[in-house]
Image (cartoon, helix red, strand yellow):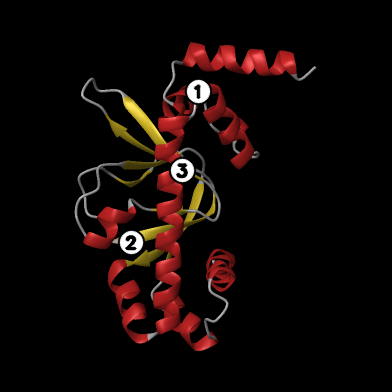
Amino acid sequence: MKAAIDTYLNSVKALCPQVTSAELDFLMSGLTVSNLKPKHFYMHANTVQKEIGFVFSGLLRTFYIDHEGSQISVNFLRENRYVTHYPAFITQTPSKYYFQCIEPTIVVNLPYKHIQECYNRFPNLERYGRLVAEEALKVLHRRVESFLFDNAETRYLDFIKENPNLFNRVSLSYLSSYLGIERQSLTRIRKKLAHHSF
């Protein structure tokens, strides 16, 4: 699984170019790699996440179960994304979400205790952690504001624009749940846009 770890370390360097080889070596010393099958749960709701996952290959869905027992999708985690409910992870409190593989997935795992040790020892790795947190916050705000200010069609178009290679990998049911609309409404939107594209 060297390729998975190398890809993760390269992502660290890309986000935080100041990081040194010694710091990366220390970071690497605590990493593990998981090879997961479709439908496997990386994490269940109401559990404390002990490791952040970095997706090397594959796809996961984040969802919760509402009061009526329906699964509501809140995120799709593709390559080079982090598998985490970040606020719950940093406070080490139970997450409200399930993380389930849609495809065969390879994940690099970063244990909470090891990350904290990295932060304590190396300012550059602490900076990297802050940058990851900032990215997570931006994603969360975009999602919240899309429901406050955008209609369903705009949310759908933004999803396609931001995830051009993800569209055919996610079922209509999952996607309509994520966009907060009925499946029939999503089908109508798609037909309308397909008609306008000719």
User: What residue does disc 1 label?
Assistant: 152
Residue at position x 33%, y 50% in the image = 85
N-terminal of the pair, mark 3 or mark 1, is: 3
Q: Is residue 32 above or below residue 46?
A: below
Q: Residue at x 20, y 50 (%)?
A: 94
Dot 1, crowdedness within 10 Å: few (<14), some or many (≥20)? some
- Is 105 left or right of 147, judged from the image as shown? right
Q: Is residue 77 above or below residue 187?
A: below
Q: Secondary structure under badge 1? A: helix
Front in this rendered view, residue 57 or 16 = 16
Establish if 126 lies above or below 163: below
Q: Report if the CB atoms under discs 2 and 1 are less than 8 Å apart.
A: no
**Neighbour tally class for label 2: few under 14, some 14-19, many 20 plus, Cα within 10 Å:** many
Tag 2 secondary structure = strand
Whole-percent x and y of residue 79?
A: 55, 51
Question: Dividing the image into 4 quarters, which one contains the C terminus?
Answer: top right
Q: Residue at x 33, y 27 (%)?
A: 71
Mark 2–mark 1 Cα distance, whole angstroms, equals 34 Å
Amino acid type, residue under disc 2 in the picture: Glu
Q: How many marks?
A: 3
Query: What residue type is disc 1 on?
Result: Ala
**Quarter of image, res 124:** bottom left
Q: Secondary structure at mark 3?
A: helix
Q: Kindly identify which residue carries mark 3.
A: 142
Residue, disc 2: 51
In x, y percent, where is residue 52?
37, 60
